[in-house]
Image (cartoon, grey):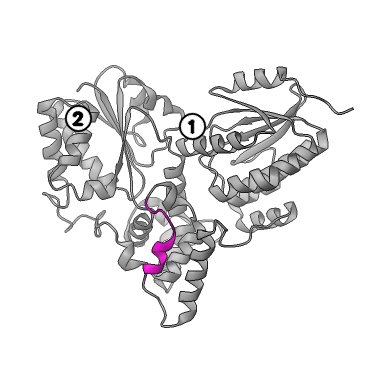
Amino acid sequence: MKHNVIVATHHKTGTVWMDGVFKAIAREVGAEYIDFKSQYGRLDGTSKRPFILLNYDSDFGEYGHLLDRADVRVLHVIRDPRDVLISAMHYHKKSGESWLHEPIPGYDNATYQRRLKTLARKFDQYIFEMEHSTASTLRDMLSWRYGRANCFEARYEDLRQDVSLTYWRRISTFLGFDQKEQEISCQSFYRNSLFGGLSRLGNKHVRSGDINQWEREFTQDLGYAFLQKFPDVLETLSYENTSSWVLKLRQAESTDMVSEKIRGVVALLAKGKPLVDTPASLAELEKCLNKEAGDSGLLAANIHDNPICTVNYDAKIPGIVVVWKRHATSLQLRFVHEKLLELIAKHGAQKVLGDDTGLAIIHHRDQEWILEDWLPRAFRAGLKAAASKRPLSYFGRASTANIQSRAVELLHQGFDDLASAREWLVHCEVVRPN
């Protein structure tokens, strides 16, 4: 092996498939095979011998540096989010995985699986799945740092149709396998594929494996619900260019009302407008976050200490420090900005320091809101300058770069480390009002 290999997947994106393929490859080429989640203890020794490592949710935490090693090549696999939803819902109704059988808060101690199975309509089962496991999976997909030179970005759909192994040979070459190892790699891939030696029968992880299941499974009302929950995910991941796909879905009811509703939704999205009105005031945003409970409730309860984003005044700058810890929904992002504005006004702050490391993406409509609504109010409150550490995520970097390039009135500089951003901001001279 010319390089060590890291395989990063997400729930229901072909994890079991890739696990079978790369276990076989490791066995044949004499590499150490490491399951990231269950074998933490072996990670410290990965520099001593060739290894193949699999991580089934692509969250590497404190071991994120492994992805940037010069001797590592990465294969990252994603799947159409609509098919992820379908596959996850059906799997979670039958799987024996332990977490599905543990009581979950807020559902009278019912387990995830029991709660899912008690919902009578398939539509409601999909809604439950969208609100829970699939939401986490799609958040991880968006949070991934795309654009790494040492990473092959693969799609489940391309792998599933690769009967000729042309696509897989490209991947094998990229990963650094020599000619003999490529033959081993291709044989392992074929034998573990549904179009090759792997049978669906008796495989508890495989229900269908087909691509584009959403075309026959989704109804227009489910498509509408999906767009409400994940308005930008398909376009962000380049699975769709517009939202018109929902018009091609079958109707769940033989009424014109559903069709008109869906057409209205698509018309709104085509104009760049949100599906639902976003609360405008801080009080309304806080009320909505408290309804969501969970991490949203923690954010609403304490902007200074929560799992999503913290905002605090630092007298040594002097200015406001914003630390993004993970992906934020539109409601969460706007709440944070309103609280930021509140602190700017309270302290008369002219500077903002942003640690954008965990900022996965800012959706287009929220970028426009920041530029057209929030920034003018921030300028009136006294904001003059900002410095930030760039996001790790490719989409996060693209989002912030777009905002910064258009915010011409704001004195701003981006950095790859927080210390440099802070140093620049502290010494940045701004004109103070008389």
Is residue 208 rendered to the left or right of residue 144? left
Q: Secondary structure at mark 1?
A: loop
User: In which quadrant of the rendered image does the N terminus lie?
Assistant: top left
Is residue 310 rendered to the left or right of residue 234? right
Amino acid found under the numbered disc labelled 2:
Thr
Placement of 67 over or under 295, stated as above or below: above
The residues colored magenta run: 239-249
Placement of 294 over or under 361, stated as above or below: below
Placement of 22 over or under 365, stated as above or below: above
- x and y percentages locating residue 325 in the rendered image: 56, 36
- x and y percentages locating residue 275 in the rendered image: 56, 62
* Label placed on residue 392: 1
Observer able to see residue 109:
no
Residue 35 location, quadrant: top left
Q: Which residue: 47% across, 52% down? A: 135
Query: Which residue is identified by label 2?
Result: 173
Is residue 72 rendered to the left or right of residue 307? left
Mark 1 residue crowding within 10 angstroms, few (<14) / some (14–19) / many (20+): some
Q: Which residue: 46% across, 58% down? A: 130
Residue 414 location, quadrant: top right
Is residue 310 rendered to the left or right of residue 130? right
Amino acid found under the numbered disc labelled 1:
Leu
Mark 2 residue crowding within 10 angstroms, few (<14) / some (14–19) / many (20+): some
Q: Nearer the viewer, residue 93 or 263?
A: 263
Q: Secondary structure at mark 2?
A: helix
Observer able to see residue 190:
yes
Residue 320 location, quadrant: top right
Q: Which residue: 40% across, 36% down? A: 146
User: In which quadrant of the rendered image does the C terminus lie?
Assistant: top right
